[in-house]
Amino acid sequence: MTTAEPKRIALIAHDQKKPMLANWVTQWADSLKDHSLYATETTGGVLKEKVPGLSLHTTRSGPLGGDQQIGAMIAEEAIDLLIFFTDPLSPHPHDVDVKALSRLAVVYDIPAAYSPATADLIMQAGYL
């Protein structure tokens, strides 16, 4: 089920979760193909490698400001959905950026999924 208007979707994953995100994107590729996809540079590189033909825009790598760039897009109401597979068991030097990104998703009331189970529920609910 696709809505009339394409959504703008941010796809991000911590290093240990990038393969999981690539698998998720592969699973939902048909539903995602008509939407504008955005990813941080490193995540985007993995997605392009693992999901041939995927069209997406990239920001800088997360630790180099990419999370903040996606956050700015949320604040400018230029992102409709955040899919961010986080790794709560590993330290992240840019943890404050990650927290700020999650905070902005709540402040601007956009759907956000931090795990495949939640992302699947959003998709199964027909959000796209």
Image: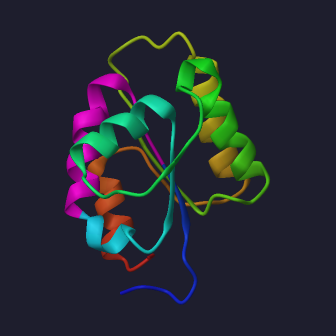
Residue 108, position in %: x, y? 72, 56
Residue 4, position in %: x, y? 54, 90
Q: Residue at x 55, y 70 (%)?
A: 7
Relative vertical location of residue 15 with respect to residue 54 in this rendering, above or below: above
Relative vertical location of residue 23 with respect to residue 66 in this rendering, above or below: below
Residue 33 image-quadrant placement? bottom left
Q: Residue at x 30, y 58 (%)?
A: 53
Residue 26 image-quadrant placement? bottom left
In this view of the protein, which residue sits in the foreground, 36 or 53? 53
Q: On the picture, is 81 further left or further right than 123?
A: right
Q: Residue at x 60, y 63 (%)?
A: 80
Residue 75, position in %: x, y? 77, 50
Task: Give the color scheme: rainbow, by chain, secondary structure or one colour.
Answer: rainbow
Q: Is residue 85 visible?
A: no
The residue segment tinted magenta is 11-27
Locate the N terminus and report the quarter of the image it occupies: bottom left
Say if the magenta span includes residue 57: no
Give the main secondary structure of the magenta stretch: helix
Q: Residue at x 39, y 28 (%)?
A: 14
Say if the magenta span includes residue 21: yes
Q: On the picture, is 96 further left or further right than 49?
A: right
In this view of the protein, which residue sits in the foreground, 119 or 13? 13
